[in-house]
Amino acid sequence: MDNKLHTGVTGKVKIFCAGGAGTNIGYHYNDVAPTPGFAECEVVYIDTSTANLKDGIAEDQFYHIGTPEGAKLDGSGGVRRDNAAHIAANIKPMLKTHVPEQFNIVVFSATGGYLNSPLH
């Protein structure tokens, strides 16, 4: 076994941050610089609303879930089942825009984001 310390970036990880909770948690990794010995980190955000966006999130990092007709949704208003079909229909197109990496993490919550997150 090789006991040498890795001195270069050892791979890539993509963090898919869904909804308010995903945004609140993932935002802390938004501008993490590559560190020798660790994977390079890319963060993307997926939501039915723009209400959870924060300063520093680039337009190309955000996928706004829409309807099959192309209209953008304006949140779920706490009733997630109302947008469940639209969310499911957007998974494949979102993955074409934000192609998964070697290792991927999905961050989300079934209970909402902003008020319920201790990290906001």
Image (cartoon, rainbow, N blue to C red):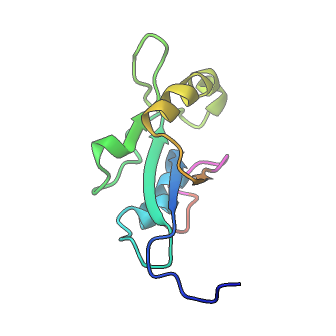
Q: Nearest the camera: 3 or 13?
A: 3
The answer, for residue 3, to whether it is visible in the render is yes
Q: Position of residue 16 (x, y in %)?
A: 53, 49
Query: The N terminus appears in which quarter of the rendering?
Result: bottom right
With 15 as the anchor, is 49 left or right in this view?
left
Q: Main secondary structure of the magenta part?
A: loop
From which residue to which does the magenta span run?
109-115
Q: Where is residue 43 in the image (x, y as percent from the top left)?
A: 44, 54
Residue at 52%, 50% in the rendered image: 17
Relative to 104, is 8 above or below? below
Q: Nearest the camera: 102 or 54?
A: 102
The answer, for residue 120, to whether it is visible in the render is no
Q: Where is residue 35 in the image (x, y as percent from the top left)?
A: 41, 76
Q: Nearest the camera: 35 or 117?
A: 35
With 60 as the anchor, is 84 left or right in this view?
right
Residue at 44%, 48% in the rendered image: 44
Relative to 63, is 43 above or below? below
Relative to 70, is 28 above or below? below
Residue at 67%, 46% in the rendered image: 110
